[in-house]
Amino acid sequence: MINTYEIMETIRMLEEEKLDIRTVTMGISLSDCADSDGAKAREKIYNKIVKYAGDLVKTAEEIELKYDIPIINKRISVTPISLVAAASNDQDYIEFAKTLDWAAQEVGVDFIGGFSALVHKGMTEADKKLISSIPEALAQTERVCSSVNIGTTRAGLNMDAVAQIGEVVKKCAELTADNGGVAASKLVVFANAPEDNPFMAGAFHGVGEGECMINVGISGPGAVKAALTKVKGEPFDLVAETIKKTAFKITRMGQLVAKEASEMLGVTAGIVDLSLAPTPAVGDSVARILEEMGIEVAGAHGTTAALALLNDAVKKGGVMASSHVGGLSGAFIPVSEDAGMIEAVEKGSLSLEKLEAMTAVCSVGLDMIAVPGKTTAETISAIIADEAAIGMVNHKTTAVRVIPVPGKDVGEEVVYGGLFGRAPIMKVSEYSSADFIARGGRIPAPLQSLKN
Amino acid sequence: MKAIISVIGVDQIGIIAEVSTLLAEEKVNILDISQTILDDYFTMTMLVELDSLEIPLEELKKKLKQKGEKLGVSIKLQHEDIFRSMHRI
């Protein structure tokens, strides 16, 4: 029998350290739903999602009951809609977003991702229609999430798309000005987007994926922090070992849920995403882990090194615990969703520049960052370009989810509530990047050799 | 299915008796039992077999929770695989 100490450790991780399964995400291929008649395509999409995901929530709840593990979110990702809608003659894809929203509502999930386009090298007519539909699509729906991949290490950066997305982000925020520009929080701009990411808002079901798959995202910053309190003052070797062991246990739980959910639903088990995903709840913060390592407030010098160690150790511990690891798999540092990050910004310890440096060593980019409403579209495009360049050169995924909050400025904050939390408005450079963004074209893919 | 029942709280007379009586009434077979004082708390873990259980699992969990509230302790029931997967390679 498992001994009492082990049982108590698991219970403590679940109850006191806020360990949970962050998301069970069902990826559904919609490639067979394409139709020259948009209405017919949407009918096929709705029926397929409801057919495959009808039991998703119920199954997740049964697993919660059986193991007493909280599964916070049940979600769906679908084939990028620009690919599915391309065959139709529709002039915009807002109706497709509404269909996704209805289907998500019908099966009881809180978010559905995949109102997406992959434009890292160029844009098809459908990609153009999708991107220009994003602001209305996100403003008029509740559950739909959108993402656009604007660069890869192999293709370089599509700067025409980057320029356009800056405008799209602004428009998303303006259309939802009454709600703090919330539509912009449902749009993620990627470089090197993963095809099997279970986390929103950036989840979509990539073209290399199967018909229907279950991907699981774990959580557990609280459990890692609690483990580190037992090795106070010890050298980093021991810190890394401790994180690895904790990550192993957390990931095994994710693997168990992934296996169980896929068996119960009769679909293929995809991947377990090893990301440490914080929530605004006290004791569930990545910033607090960095502070536990000896950084007084997240953002102080040493933060990037601490994060590099954390991110690497989580992966090393997690990889052995799961048969298939994928998605984003790295520590998340979303400002609004992490109590420690919020505090660090408010204390003036954490700036956009430092966050950018941190994203060079961890997932997943500038996430849930509120900037002044007066920030120009070109500046947002330039923030995206900087972040995408880090991803492109370092062969990693980076993403940008910034919200230019209408009517707000530095010193104020925006409150979204729930998992989205609250975000202090962060300062951006006051100097213009407009001429840089106006150039357009493509930034060529980086050299893959001569690595010094 | 095999599950672990854990009981944590302040020690008092009759906790094991109360819990095992409830389990017997619901046809839950106790396979192994261990009790200790951990960090000043009474801590009991039981490995149980639920194959003869006649009520839904949810119902049993609810009854255990109510029993726990009555005794002033926390009682949880979890499938044993969660512990096995976290602590055994």
Image (tube, rainbow, N blue to C red):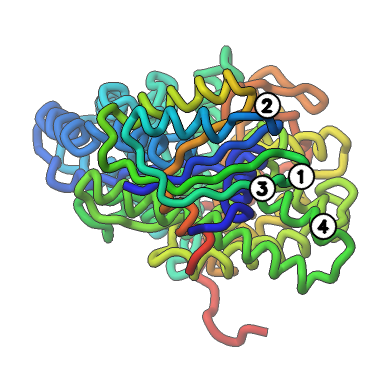
Q: Which mark is residue A293?
A: 4
Query: In the displayed image of the protein, which residue is found farthest to the top?
Result: A178
For discs 4 and 1, the disc positioned in front in the rendered view: 1
Type of amino acid at the residue the image marks with label 1: Asp
Label 4 secondary element: loop
Q: Give the alpha-carbon distance from disc 4 to disc 2, as whole Å.
A: 25 Å
Q: Which mark is residue A422?
A: 2
Q: What residue is drawn where x is 45% and y is 48%?
A: B47
Q: Which residue is mark 3?
A: B36
Q: Are marks 4 and 1 on the same chain?
A: no
Q: Give the alpha-carbon distance from disc 1 to disc 3, as whole Å.
A: 10 Å
For discs 4 and 2, the disc positioned in front in the rendered view: 4
B51 or A25, nearer to the observer: B51
Q: Residues within 10 Å of mark 2 (few under 14, many from 20)?
A: many
Say above or below: B24 vs A352: above
Say above or below: A220 vs B56: below
For discs 4 and 3, the disc positioned in front in the rendered view: 3
Q: Give the alpha-carbon distance from disc 4 to disc 1, as whole Å.
A: 26 Å
Type of amino acid at the residue the image marks with label 4: Met
Question: Residue B9 location in percent, x, y?
Answer: 67, 33
Label 3 secondary element: strand
Q: Give the alpha-carbon distance from disc 2 to disc 1, as whole Å.
A: 37 Å
Q: Which residue is mark 1?
A: B39
Q: Give the alpha-carbon distance from disc 4 to disc 3, as whole Å.
A: 33 Å
Type of amino acid at the residue the image marks with label 2: Arg
Question: Residue B89 location in percent, x, y?
Answer: 48, 69
Instruction: Give yes or no for contact between labels 4 and 2 (Cβ–Cβ under 8 Å).
Output: no
Mark 2 chain: A
